[in-house]
Amino acid sequence: MNKYFPLTPKMWQDWAKDEISLSSGRGSFDDVEKLYECGVQEYLSIKLWRDYLDYVEEHDQSVSQCTQSGLSKMRDLYERAITAGGLHVTEGSKLWEAYREYEMAILTMSDGNDEEKAKQVQRIRVLFHRQLSVPLADIDSTLAEYKSWEAEEGSGKDQDSQFNDVPPNVLSAYKKASEMYNARKQYEDQLSDTTESETNKLQVFLKYIKFEESSGDPARVQVLYERAVSELPVSSDLWMGYTSYLDRTLKVPAILKSVYHRATRNCTWISDLWVRYLLSLERIHASEDELRHVFEQAIRCSFPSMKEYLDIYLTRVDSLRRRMPAGLDFELIRQTFVAAAEFLSPQLGTEELLLLHAYWAKLECNIGKDLAAARGVWENTIKKSGSVLEVWQHYISMETEMGHIHEARSLYKRCYSKKFAGSGSEPVQMMECYEML
């Protein structure tokens, strides 16, 4: 199922638990670890991250035995979890607490080396300091826990006072974080209301996101978008806003690819997302293989109208055209036009039909340097849509723009006796144009 559809965090949790119940040996551990890795990349879920962290801590031998490689692996995983969800206002503290508990457990297992113990104490202290600089819902209880811990370590003197013995830089960061939390509390209260409809929740998220964008911290904006799409995964407004924000602000290739990939998996029917995906890949200089793969995925989707398929094809052509100086073969453009014409022509309106074929003929002339091929585009169009006056007009216009008056006259003569769909005055209009040559 996951090959075709995103899975909810709860489904990833259930899948992982099923695999764990059937697992035995190192190979099974690796499989479950990969499963968690896929899950945490699909949507932001603090619960799934906690399950992942607990599983690795319990079942990875290098971690449970506290080898150097195990310690490094576990710390790296905790840092990734903090990066992904540590800024989550209401649930982020669960990741910070788990990280501190892990480091505190390491401290209790220290072998008596004073220098190593001092380093470990400092690691825990730094974690407290980092968390106290983040606007989280339970920041006050974190401060109290920090003061209690410092007192146990012998660094605090006045545990009863709220701020005494808290380093000035930490206190300043804590106060700023508290102010930031208070500014966000109204939005968090509304999001926590389980009676709110999805429509209302979407509006709250959009207002909250606008507020975060005005605050100017891209990491906070990104985490909020991740929270929003996790709760409202098929909201195209959220995915469009998220991808647009990343294109404008972060411009990090790995993040852009990940988010666009997930956006198009959640909202396959939104052609604008596919168009933006292709443009974004081109901007970050993705390979032709990757661009072609995404394009082929897009045209296999179900869009509401033929015009949206046309937009995908033309975006592909534009991309190929822009990358011609890098050594791409014009035949790729020609093949794309052929495929588009075969797929779309029977169902396109006149305006879209002309747009496709006029662009094709223009590129055959200007880039392919093949006038015969350009004429062939229009001749094939006439075979299928010869009763459409505008097709002849565009064909004649191409010839006159290139100064081919004789060829233009020949086309006027060919279409003079044609019966066009319309008022009946079309042959007269064509004859008047012919006489002006």
Image (cartoon, helix red, strand yellow):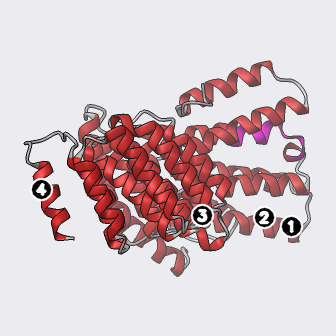
Contact, mark 4 vs mark 1 (Cβ under 8 Å):
no
Name the foreground residue: 1 vs 218: 1
Circle 2/circle 1 CB separation < 8 Å = yes
Give the residue at x 61% y 74%: 325
Q: CA distance from mark 2 to mark 3?
A: 36 Å
Q: Nearer the viewer, mark 3 or mark 1?
A: 3
Circle 4 Cα neighbour tier, 10 Å, few/some/many (<14 / 14–19 / ≥20): few
Sequence order check, earlier mark of 2 and 4: 2
Which disc number belongs to residue 116? 1
* Residue bearing mark 3: 253
Pointer 3 and pointer 1: residues touching (CB < 8 Å)? no
Are the residues at dot 2 and dot 4 in contact (C-beta closer than 8 Å)? Answer: no
Q: Amino acid at mark 1?
A: Glu
Is 186 rendered above or below residue 33? below
Residue 359 percent location from the top left of the image: 40, 59
Judged left or right of residue 191, residue 297 is right
Which-is-in-front pick, marks 3 and 4? 4
* Residue 162 appears anywhere in the view: no
Where, quadrant-wise, is the C terminus in this rendering? Answer: bottom left
Q: Disc 4 residue type? A: Gln
Q: CA distance from mark 3 to mark 1?
A: 39 Å
Residue 120: numbered disc: 2
Q: Is residue 56 magenta?
A: yes
Quadrant in which the N terminus is drawn: top right
SS for callout 1: helix
Q: Residue at x 83, y 65 (%)?
A: 117
Give the number of the mark in front: 4 or 1: 4
| Relative to 340, 254 lies left or right | right
Give the magenta range: 52-62
